Image (tube, rainbow, N blue to C red):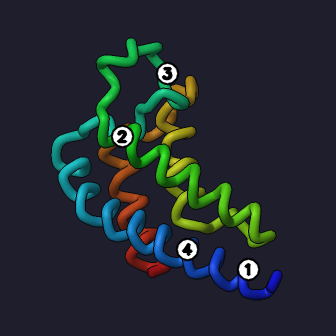
Amino acid sequence: MKRDRSAEGERRLATSEALLRKSLLEVLPAVVKTGAPLFTNSKHNLHDLPKHLIDEEAEAFLEMALACVELREHLGLVTDESVGRLFLAACEEGSSSDENRRGPRKLAEALVERLRNDG
């Protein structure tokens, strides 16, 4: 019974991570071109933008990434190099006060490369 739940959780995780990866690979090329604020969301908001100025797509990606990482943790799996963790790391860097942080274009470019190489 426990094994069945674990297998079901792993199937859900695989499906969720595949959807997150596919969705990111669809939108990131546009972020590379436009510099859209995909990495700015309610949790990573360097300039304290009001909620109504945070892009809905950025918020949706945050929720998807957090759900994937949470499910990985629940299943006892490593999260470090997971697609959700990679997206969250880009968000964290984008909201860092480090003056040498990469902007959305460079973050998107690096994330595309990681997702294509790890996929």
Q: Which residue is labeled 1 in the image? A: 6
Q: Which residue is labeled 4 in the image? A: 12
Q: In terms of image quadrants, where is residue 111?
A: bottom left
Q: In terms of image quadrants, where is residue 56?
A: top left
Inter-mark Cα distance, 4 to 1: 10 Å
Q: What amino acid does circle 4 point to?
A: Arg
Q: Position of residue 89 (x, y in %)?
A: 57, 49
Image quarter where the N terminus lies is: bottom right
Decide: marks 2, 3 in contact (CB < 8 A)? no
Q: Residue at x 40, y 38 (%)?
A: 59
Of the numbered discs in the image, which one, if any, rests on residue 46?
3
Q: What amino acid does circle 1 point to?
A: Ser
Decide: marks 2, 1 in contact (CB < 8 A)? no
Specify whether 75 is left or right of 113.
right
Q: What amino acid does circle 2 point to?
A: Ala
- Tell me the element at label 4: helix
Decide: marks 2, 4 in contact (CB < 8 A)? no
- Tell me the element at label 1: helix
Of the numbered discs in the image, which one, if any, rests on residue 58?
2
Q: Nearer the viewer, residue 111 or 59?
A: 59
Q: Position of residue 41 (x, y in %)?
A: 44, 32
Q: What amino acid does circle 3 point to?
A: Leu
Whichever of callouts 3 and 4 sits on the residue coming sooner in the sequence is 4
Q: Residue at x 49, y 69 (%)?
A: 17
Inter-mark Cα distance, 2 to 3: 14 Å
37 above or below 106? above
Inter-mark Cα distance, 2 to 4: 22 Å
Specify whether 31 is left or right of 94.
left
State which mark lies toward you, 2 or 1: 1
State which mark lies toward you, 3 or 4: 4
Q: Nearer the viewer, residue 33 or 43?
A: 43
